[in-house]
Image: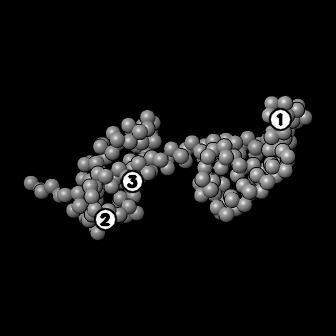
Amino acid sequence: MSETRSDGELLRAIAADGDRHAFEELYRRYAPWLTARLRSRCADAGIVDDVVQETFLQVWRGSARYREEGDVAGWLWRIGSRRLVDALRGDGARGRLRQALARLRHRDEASAEERVLAGVEHGDLAGALIRLSPELRAVLQATVIDGLTTREAAVVLGIPPGTVKTRALRARKQLREALA
């Protein structure tokens, strides 16, 4: 009969030797618990299952290092809860941004009727937004409407954070001038 190894022993074996049996034991020990805790925060079982897998994948790859301080369950919870926040932020914001950019990308020039309706519904703001370049509009969409940070917007848009800041400043300046 084999002796049950402590959490610390399992993590050391995973880190040092890539011990698959140690990893499987750690997974069996904590995956159900982590899944239950994450499901109390997110009703989407698919997202929760992905987050649990990503959490343990970080442990296996060694990108998450346990410093032997505190409880292993708490350490796994920190990794999992951060991954959940990332997943929820990413899906919501990225999905909305992709839809908005797709609408703008597939939209040719606005018809005269659309311009008139936009002006009636939203006053000068709609016209000012339409006159912005697609690059400036995309940055405003990401940072203002979707609420992404500069860093998150940079990742989603595939541009450096400094470019996001510059474009946001230019867009705001152009909007102020158009609305003044």
List the single residue furthest toward the bottom: 16
Q: Which residue is mark 3?
A: 79
* Crowdedness near tag 2: few (<14), some (14–19) or many (≥20) residues, C-alpha within 10 Å: few
Amino acid type assigned to the residue bearing label 3 in the image:
Ile
What residue is shown at x 85% (from left), y 46% (from top)? 180
What residue is shown at x 34% (from left), y 41% (from top)? 37
List the single residue furthest toward the front: 180
What residue is shown at x 39% (from left), y 50% (from top)? 80
Q: Tell me if residue 53 can be seen.
A: no
List the single residue furthest toward the left: 1
First along the sequence among labels 2 and 3? 2
Q: Spatial distance from mark 2 to mark 3, Cα to Cα? A: 13 Å
What residue is shown at x 35% (from left), y 63% (from top)? 65
Q: Which residue is mark 1?
A: 123
Dot 1 and dot 2 residues touching (CB under 8 Å): no
> Which quadrant holds residue 163?
bottom right
Question: SS at mark 3?
Answer: helix
Relative to 124, is 95 on the left or the right? Answer: left
* Crowdedness near tag 3: few (<14), some (14–19) or many (≥20) residues, C-alpha within 10 Å: some
Give x and y (percent) for residue 109: 86, 42
Q: Which residue is mark 2?
A: 67
Nearest the viewer among 105 and 78 is: 78
Amino acid type assigned to the residue bearing label 2 in the image:
Arg
Dot 2 and dot 3 residues touching (CB under 8 Å): no
